Amino acid sequence: MVTTAELFDLSHSLAGTYLSRFVYPWQALDGISDLILSLGAQLGADYEERQPQVWVHKTATIAPTAYLGSPCIIGPGSEVRHCAFIRGSALVGENCVVGNSVELKNVILFDNVQVPHFNYAGDSILGYRSHMGAGAVTSNVKSDQSLVVVKNGSEAIPTNRKKFGAILGDHVEIGCNSVLNPGTVIGRHSNVYPTSCVRGVVPEYSIWKTGGVVVKKFGKD
């Protein structure tokens, strides 16, 4: 349950057509910047180019203290709050919340994603209606600087990437102050308990509990 098709409803992102080209979603990370530049040139009158290569929909709300680095797109109805730091290469979808002191770098946020309080998402893709609790972060580089491997049970899938945070499928809930280690992939409709340290693949409709115990949600066996 780690392929692009298994994790996302691609109709909920401007990046849908682009992502459909890749078997695994992390294969798309290298091209996010170029994707944004390509999309930005086609967005039309509903978007304002507030500075070079920074496109903001007219219905989006941007706090005056927020930093929008290029290239980035902020979608309709989205809110970027006080002291948010968008370093660049960020595609933020429709009706998203990028909260206070949140940092984004080389990411795709599908529609209705919430990263509302003190989050870091780098080299990551967050699926439709996924939510990161306060203080939850993606760790995108291993401590030994080696290439990231996605561990799916006994299988180890090489990514050939030094920087790769996490992939959250649609409707994923991440508890407060959790750390998603490099190469974490969380399947659709799964939950992670607060203060968790997560690595590897969490299947869809699962709950990652304290100590890394994973159980299926009731009725989803």
Image: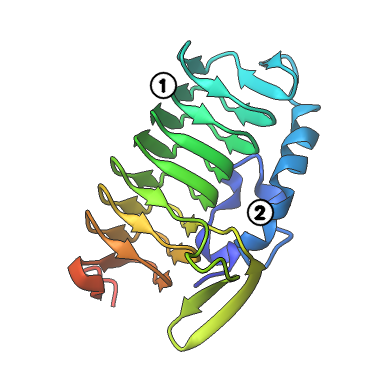
* Residue at the limit of the structure toward the front, as seen here: 144
Q: Position of residue 197 (x, y in %)?
A: 31, 63
Label 1 SS:
loop
Residue 82, compared with residue 115, is above or below; it is above
Check disc 1: other Cα within 10 Å, few if <14, some if 14-19, many if 20+. many
- Tell whether 113 sits left or right of 71: left
Q: Quarter of the image containing the C terminus?
A: bottom left
Which of these two is toward me, 67 or 61? 67
User: Considering only order in the chain, which callout, 1 or 2, is on the residue closer to the N terminus?
Assistant: 2
| Amino acid type, mark 1 | Arg
Residue under the point 30% across and 42% down: 135
Residue 17's disc is none
Percent of width and height locating residue 179: 35, 56
The front one of 6 and 48 is 48
Q: Nearer the viewer, residue 122 or 143?
A: 143
Q: Residue at x 28, y 59 (%)?
A: 192
Percent position of residue 195, x then y: 23, 55
Real-space Cα separation, disc 2 to disc 1, in angstroms: 25 Å
Q: Hey, what amino acid is under mark 2?
A: Leu
**Mark 2 surroundings within 10 Å by alpha-carbon count, few (fewer than 14), some (14 through 19), many (20 or more):** some
Q: Dot 2: what SS?
A: helix
Identify the residue at horizontal 58%, vertical 79% (top origin).
157
Residue highlighted by disc 2:
29
User: Is residue 159 positioned above or below 104 on the image?
Assistant: below
Q: Which mark is residue 81?
A: 1
Left or right, residue 214 beside residue 150: left
Quarter assignment of residue 24:
bottom right
Report the residue at 21% width, 67% height from top.
Answer: 209
Q: Position of residue 167 (x, y in %)?
A: 50, 58
49 with respect to 134 (left or right): right
Seen from this angle, which residue lies furthest bottom? 154
Is residue 17 shown above or below 60? below
